[in-house]
Amino acid sequence: MLIRGLLGICDKARKVCFSSHRSMGGAAGKTSGLDNVVKRAETRVGKLTVSGRYHRSPRKLEDDYTVIKKKVLGSGYNGQVYQATSKAGGGTYAVKGFKLNGVPKDKRDELEAECEIFLAMDHPHVARLVDVYQSEDRLELVMECMSGGELFHRVQKQKRFTEKAAAQAAYQMLLALNYVHSHGVAHRDIKLENFLYEKEDSDHLKLIDFGFSKIWLPNTMMRLSCGTLAYVAPEVLNQSYTSQCDMWSVGVSIFILLFGYMPFAGKEEKQIADIKAGRFTRKEDKWKLVSPSAQDFVQKLLVVKPEQRMTAEDALKHEWIASRDNNETQLPDEVVGAIVSFGEVSSFRRACMSMMAWSLTNEERASVRQAFVAMDQDKSGTIKLWEFKKVLDEKCNIKDEDAKKLFEALDTNHTDEIHYSEFLAAMVSTRIAMHDDLLKATFKRFDTDNSGRITVSNLREVLGDNFEGESVEKIMKEADVTGSGDISYEEWILYLRTGNTNEEHANLAAQLIDQKLANRSGSCGKLIEVSKTKEAAAMAAAAAASKKQADKDKQAPCCSLQ
């Protein structure tokens, strides 16, 4: 059920895939193109976000995952997609592999573009690329496994959605697209098959398949005809278009959810003529069952002239979406406490927690993701400084300059916006448990050569020569308890489960809490105080356990940390 959309498989019974043919050149260089892909992705979202997920030889897929060859989730032009199990935590994932040898240049370019774009995606309603493995002859993408099936299959089963369900689905689709578009990407293959449900009993949708996607510059036109004909925009057929082509495709998708049939059908020639004219099929017996507001929403998307068509931002403000039955979680006060606690710790500890965010399970992310959406007030898919300041001022009366320092602590990749995984990092240890599987998976992301120890060279590969103004040699000393020059797994656990806070942020947090408790006795101040008390108790317990273990080690013939 997972990968029909991921592979872009053609089901001729309901869609026709098409693309213009490009010249077939010779095979591209094996690594140079992918090296540039990684560098460009790091420029877009930060080194830390990319480096811990992109692995090169001698690190192999099989080092971290057990691929189940009998569990084929789908197949397509590039081969089969298999189910895999993580060796660190036992979670289920999907693995999509590509050959690198003898690949024509146009296909190589498509692969590199997909990898670059997917690496930079980080949103609650976009499927997560968990790991990438590059060897001499293959590239393996490890993605979260979406077991709930396609949105297409669900509407096929139900015939048509209720307006309430359709509005909720549309809202999630628009959140994903507004994020994608605001970060300079056109998807170019929006359709019901490319939105998957997280689980069978869940209504949480995620966008998949960036095989046709393109990093797009404003005021430029794209020319390649691609996508799925029944969903394609008129300007794509004319081979001159912008990212607004995706919004036409959203209109087609919501049309199907509301009315239960395809707006453009028939032979290919007829579909093309109707699409170019904006002449969709209107069945009055179906339309009278749908509210005028929902009808207006669809009609404002199926507009032939892209400049007159609603953007994703416009569509999110439309009455039909804005007035939907909104059960969104309001921002819990505890989240602010978690943010303040995160701001206290050292830069390396924040880097570790940021890396942990990419090893969280669906269930762990689900517990806090609505809080991220609540803070993202303009629905661009990231949290800007003005949004951050507004929330902290409303919740805790935190001053602008103090909020800015906390914002900078969360913005680990220095992109002037807080991405989803950076927010998740702040929730680790206070809102999300720092369990053994998570610690092990994160250790392996820093242990880039799979040696079983984190070296200075490993840190340099993941963090760069310096991180937050500190050299990797200095960072190493922070966690290298034994002074051996590297970090063992035992030292790693000890480091992350005990204190070691950054003095500047600790002082800031103390000032904020003291100010809050002095100014008012509201719930936020109490929660932050409780958060700090719990954290202090946890650190004390960990330190006591560490001392007990050290005393035991003195009596033992050797030390477990050596």
Image (spheres, rainbow, N blue to C red):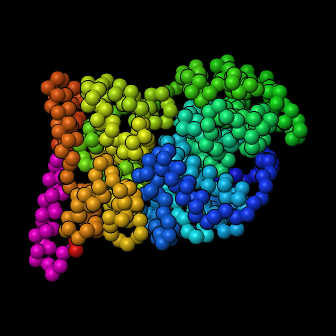
For residue 258, which quarter of the picture?
Answer: top right
Question: What segment is highlighted magenta in the picture?
Answer: 535-560
Against 30, residue 390 (above or below) is above
Residue 319 in view of the camera: yes
For residue 447, which quarter of the picture?
Answer: bottom left
Q: Name the spot of residue 57 as percent of width and height, x first.
A: 50, 70
Q: Name the spot of residue 189 as percent of width and height, x first.
A: 68, 43
The structure residue drawn at horizontal position 41% and vertical position 69%, both measured from the top left corner, is 449
Q: Quadrant of the C terminus?
A: bottom left
The structure residue drawn at horizontal position 65% and vertical position 31%, both measured from the top left corner, is 219
Is 553 part of what is drawn in magenta?
yes
The structure residue drawn at horizontal position 40% and vertical position 58%, both measured from the top left corner, is 462
Q: Is residue 21 left or right of residue 422?
A: right
The structure residue drawn at horizontal position 70% and vertical position 64%, both measured from the top left corner, is 27
For residue 370, which quarter of the picture?
Answer: top left
Is 386 part of what is drawn in magenta?
no
Q: Name the spot of residue 329 as percent of width and height, x first.
A: 41, 32
Residue 338 in view of the camera: no
Against 34, residue 341 (above or below) is above
